[in-house]
Amino acid sequence: SAEPSKYLLFAEMESAGACFKWLADELGPIMSEGIPKDDIYSYLDEIALKSPPGSNGLIFCPWMYGERSPIPDTTVRGGFINLSLDNKLEDIVRSVLEGVALHTRWIVDTLGRCGFRPNSLRIIGGGAKSDLWVQILADVLGRDIERVAEPQESGARGAALIAFVGLGVYKDISSLRKVVEVTRVFHPHKEHREIYDGAYVTIKEVYGRLRKLYSRINKG
């Protein structure tokens, strides 16, 4: 990593925020007539809040562009599992947020085999601006999630802070922790654990059962 005495542990999810963007781009114009484009994500959050944890049994598989971790599979694709006439629009929207969170748990659990078992995680990026999505992540992962100030710009800020260490402005990488402001900590709701544990088992089973099918229909 940027600090020679340590390693950078990295696992990439091929499409996370891109799943929510796809939903906003493709369904947003239909659902949100008269809503300013800049407010579409907040509007979708409001819709998703009407659905309970577990999205009334609907599971979204977020493999919209293949996947990298922990399943290096270029042929797998996304989809909605267990969709019924009882499901409403709010279930579809919430299931997208939950599907990304469920796959994130799969990644974090896999990294645990490498000794990565933190009690809390920090979140950055545009998706971190959604209170609902961050809370879902906390509930699914069963960990506190810390949101930093201005999370969407954190990548650029992190690169700049590493450069400051190189220039001697800060002593080392560890000293940067006091520079990065945490604005809110999201604690997991224990009452949602059983629902998300079941959904987690299901989404992994879906991949196991369908991966050969995806390979056949997408091999070209």
Image: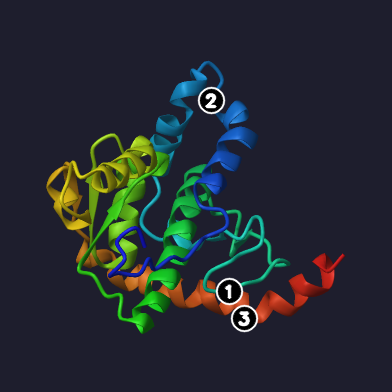
How many circles with numbers are drawn on the protein?
A: 3
User: Which residue is depicted at the point 45% across and 33% down?
Assistant: 41
Circle 2 Cα neighbour tier, 10 Å, few/some/many (<14 / 14–19 / ≥20): some
Q: For residue 5, which numbered disc appears in the image? A: none
Q: For residue 71, which numbered disc appears in the image? A: 1
Q: Position of residue 89 (x, y in %)?
A: 53, 43
State how far apart marks 1 and 2 are (Cα).
Answer: 35 Å
Q: Residue reaching furthest front? A: 167
Any part of residue 99 in sight = yes
Q: Nearer the viewer, residue 86 or 163?
A: 163
Q: Which residue is mark 3?
A: 208
**Sequence-wise first label, 3 or 2:** 2
Any part of residue 88 in sight = no
**Sequence-wise first label, 1 or 2:** 2
Amino acid type assigned to the residue bearing label 3 in the image: Gly
Q: Does the CB distance between marks 1 and 2 fall below 8 Å?
A: no
Vertical placement of residue 91 versus 141, above or below: above
The N terminus - image quarter: bottom left
Q: Position of residue 169 (x, y in %)?
A: 18, 41
